[in-house]
């Protein structure tokens, strides 16, 4: 089955219902979106590409993004969404490595794509070539379950990006599991793309478009809390994916109100318990959590709104600080060293053109996530840190996450990241990089907070106050870079 069949279903079931929204406005209903997609797919097919050809998209969020990606699938090709924040060298690498035949790009990305040296045909979204591609509509192409749908270049906080091969089967499994484990479906409503469609937010099209939720893109194409606030009022039953840092910015936005917000699904990085509680305080029980990675997109563990509400009311911080329970379509366990392993229909087929990395990641059908975690007796998984982030001081293991959780409780701490520094006496010692809101935050106040909450040996020996933390193009903190600063 081709995933794009969902679009056809929507066009039949609810032809006049809102399909695409930009800012306040509805820009297409399902009948017209399906018609545009079938035509663009026709134009691509007319270029003579073989089934499975990779077509890249290098563009910020727009409603045309959704049209482009569904047209690629409709015609039986594979999409390669590339994050626009990548360094031009990384962009060039993804285009070359994926062997993309064509690149859809936004106008602002034209220069970078041209400079990449890619042999791919360039088509500017909205430009004359783009318009010419809307040709004779074609029927939905057939897709086998294991056909490539999305080549997902992973964020990687170290090394080269790797292309996780996500198939139609994977996407359908992910969508089904989402309804069971993250957010039971409700008719109507919309998905608000406040995060990149090339990555976090784009995957949410699988479950939401399938049930007929409109795909809404902020006018700015990016993440602006004031604009998001307006859109929560304008649209109904709003679903949104947000990384924990985005949730924090929303919560801290003056006068923020939930409006018609239905659910924020958070994930992509650790959500500290203190932050989750603050978010619930401001916006109510409108949070669900999801833990996944490009290699098993959106689908390892999770928690519904109801589960988070129950844990919050019971004062169960262990559950609030966890990433929830294994999703329905996967088996999840931890290896002897704590690494989280996943097996099931959401797990990628392998890495594109990289047998060595594939053999390392997939062993006996189990995906090795590189994340370290622990299950409790109730089946809740708590992530510790990636093994390389673990600090070993005086022979004791210290998980930075645990120290960060404590420091984050200080109202004057905006952001924090804890790493290990080489130490002649202890092997490693704990160092905290802190972005503070005001000067009231000092070594002494933070040390007192740690003494009240965690074992003495876990306390940072040193605090370094910084303006901001280094992050990669996906907003993940680069601990490697912090460690380098110390060496
Ligand atoms: P990516 O492949 O870019 O989506 O990054 C996936 C990684 O983000 C995972 O391997 C985890 O390390 C982290 N991650 C994803 N979801 C969560 C979550 N809910 N809580 C903590 N970390 C997460």
Image: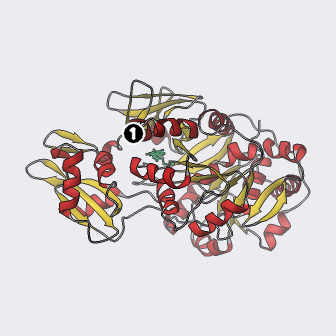
In the current view of this chain or complex, which residue is farthest to the right?
Answer: 136
Which residue corresponds to the image point at 41% horizontal and 54% vertical from the top-left?
157
* Quarter location, residue 327: top right
Quarter of the image for residue 257 reads bottom right
At which x and y percent is residue 176? 67, 34
- Residue at the (77%, 73%) spot, across then down: 127
Answer with the quarter of the image where residue 42 lies: bottom right
Badge 1 marks a residue whose secondary structure is: helix
Categorize mark 1 by other alpha carbons within 10 Å: few (<14), some (14-19), many (20+).
Answer: few
Residue 134 appears left or right of 394: right
The foreground one among 9 and 235 is 235
Q: Which residue is tagged 1?
A: 317
Asked whether the viewer can see residue 301, the reply is no
Report the quarter where the C terminus lies: bottom left
Whole-percent x and y of residue 83?
Answer: 57, 61
Residue at far top of view: 377
Q: Percent from the top left, x then y, of residue 310?
A: 51, 35
Q: Nearer the viewer, residue 195 or 148?
A: 195
Q: Residue at x 32, y 67 (%)?
A: 436
């Amino acid at each position: 089955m081709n995933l794009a069949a969902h679009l056809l279903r929507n066009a039949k079931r609810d032809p006049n219902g809102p399909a695409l929204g930009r800012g306040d406005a509805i820009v297409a209903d399902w009948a017209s979106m399906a018609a545009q997609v079938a035509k663009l797919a026709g134009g691509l097919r007319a270029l003579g590409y073989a089934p499975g050809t990779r077509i890249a998209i290098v563009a910020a969020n727009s409603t045309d993004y959704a049209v482009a990606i569904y047209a690629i699938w409709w015609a039986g090709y594979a999409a390669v969404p590339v994050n626009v924040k990548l360094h031009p060298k990384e962009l060039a690498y993804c285009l070359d490595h994926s062997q993309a035949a064509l690149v859809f790009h936004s106008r602002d990305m034209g220069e970078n794509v041209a400079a990449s040296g890619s042999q791919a045909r360039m088509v500017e979204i909205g430009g004359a070539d783009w318009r010419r591609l809307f040709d004779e509509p074609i029927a939905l192409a057939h897709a086998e379950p294991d056909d490539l749908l999305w080549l997902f270049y992973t964020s990687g906080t170290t090394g080269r990006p790797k292309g996780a091969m996500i198939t139609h089967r994977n996407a359908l499994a992910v969508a089904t599991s989402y309804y069971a484990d993250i957010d039971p479906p409700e008719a109507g409503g919309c998905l608000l793309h406040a995060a990149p469609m090339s990555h976090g937010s784009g995957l949410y099209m699988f479950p939401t478009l399938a049930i007929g939720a409109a795909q809404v893109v902020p006018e700015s194409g990016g993440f602006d809390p004031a604009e998001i606030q307006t859109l929560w009022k304008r649209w109904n039953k709003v679903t949104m994916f947000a990384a924990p840092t985005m949730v924090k910015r929303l919560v801290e936005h003056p006068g923020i109100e939930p409006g018609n917000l239905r659910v924020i699904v958070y994930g992509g990085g650790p959500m500290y318990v203190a932050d989750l509680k603050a978010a619930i305080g401001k916006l109510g029980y409108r949070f669900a959590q999801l833990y996944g990675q490009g290699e098993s997109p959106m689908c390892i563990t999770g928690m519904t709104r109801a589960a988070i509400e129950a844990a919050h009311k019971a004062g169960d911080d262990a559950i609030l600080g966890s990433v929830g329970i294994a999703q329905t379509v996967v088996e999840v366990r931890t290896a002897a060293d704590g690494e989280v392993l996943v097996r099931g229909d959401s797990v990628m087929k392998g890495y594109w053109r990289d047998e060595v990395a594939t053999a390392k990641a997939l062993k006996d059908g189990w995906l090795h996530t590189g994340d370290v975690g622990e299950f409790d007796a109730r089946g809740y998984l708590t992530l510790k840190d990636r093994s390389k982030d673990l600090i070993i001081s005086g022979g004791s293991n210290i998980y930075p996450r645990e120290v960060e959780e404590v420091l984050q409780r200080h109202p004057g701490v905006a952001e924090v990241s804890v790493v290990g520094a080489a130490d002649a006496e202890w092997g490693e010692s704990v160092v905290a990089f802190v972005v503070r809101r005001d000067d009231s935050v000092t070594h002494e106040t933070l040390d007192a907070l740690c003494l009240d909450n965690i074992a003495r040996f876990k306390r940072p020996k040193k605090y370094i106050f910084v303006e901001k933390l280094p992050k990669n193009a996906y907003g993940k903190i680069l601990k490697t870079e912090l460690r380098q600063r110390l060496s």
